[in-house]
């Protein structure tokens, strides 16, 4: 006698939320959790120098901007997936992965600069390696922001190409 497979409908439908179509939605939840964790840290301002002026920017504002950007990307792509109008799915995957890597690099660099460790302690005038590490982190922040801004251009390109879609394309 044969046995029938056990079917669990809830488990099958709950796995659909883990598909690649929800990358930006998952990442916006991760950014929100990271913002809540930043609220607990004692250093809440990101201090940077530009043209001989020192500026302070609250880290919750940086996190909030990236959260809104991720939610906006998630909504646009979910609409395109819902109406099956996404023309280039590989643009979506490239955009999502670049957004993930650059945002994690940016947040880790900012967190490392802001935490109370050897940058904030006594500074001897002959220890220049600390400045080299901080300069490297500043460069990683700038490069990740430039790459992220360039990758963000994939969203309007993909959206406009999807509006003028001809024929059905299987995803």
Image: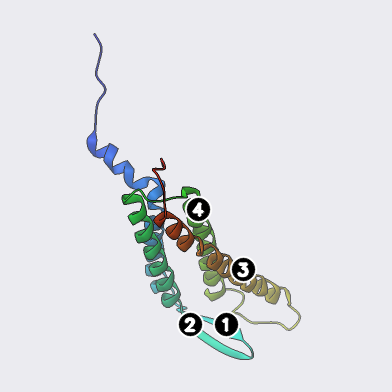
**Which residue was labeled with disc 3?**
143
* Residue located 72% across and 73% down the image: 129
Pointers 2 and 4 in contact (C-beta within 8 Å):
no
Mark on residue 91?
4
Residue 48: numbered disc: 1
Give the camera-side residue of 91 and 31: 91
Q: Establish if 53 lies above or below 129.
A: below
Distance from disc 2 to disc 4, alpha carbons, whole Å, reads: 32 Å
The answer to whether mark 4 and mark 3 are in CB contact below 8 A is: no
Q: Are marks 4 and 1 in contact (CB under 8 Å)?
A: no
Is residue 116 visible in the rendered image? The answer is: no
**Which numbered disc, 4 or 3, marks the residue that appears first in the sequence?**
4
Q: Which mark is residue 57?
A: 2
Looking at marks 2 and 4 on the same chain, the residue that comes earlier in the sequence is marked by 2
Judged from the image, the secondary structure of the residue bearing numbered disc 2 is strand
Q: Are marks 2 and 1 in contact (CB under 8 Å)?
A: yes
Does residue 28 appear to the left or right of 139 in the view shown? left
Taking the image as shown, residue 12 lies to the left or right of residue 93, namely left
Q: At which x and y percent is residue 165?
A: 41, 51
């Amino acid at each position: 006698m044969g046995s029938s497979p056990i079917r669990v409908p809830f488990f099958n439908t709950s796995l659909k939320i883990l598909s690649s179509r929800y990358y930006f939605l998952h990442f916006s939840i991760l950014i929100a959790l990271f913002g809540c964790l930043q609220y607990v840290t004692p250093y809440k301002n990101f201090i940077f120098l530009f043209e001989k002026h020192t500026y302070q920017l609250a880290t919750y504002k940086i996190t909030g901007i990236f959260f809104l950007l991720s939610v906006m990307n998630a909504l646009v792509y979910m609409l395109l997936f819902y109406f099956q109008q996404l023309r280039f799915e590989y643009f979506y995957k490239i955009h999502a992965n670049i957004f993930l890597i650059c945002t994690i690099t940016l947040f880790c660099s900012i967190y490392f600069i802001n935490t109370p460790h050897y940058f904030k302690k006594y500074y001897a005038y002959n220890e220049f390696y600390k400045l080299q590490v901080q300069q490297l982190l500043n460069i990683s922040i700038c490069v990740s922001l430039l790459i992220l801004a360039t990758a963000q251009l994939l969203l309007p390109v993909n959206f406009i190409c999807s509006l003028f879609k001809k024929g059905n394309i299987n995803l």
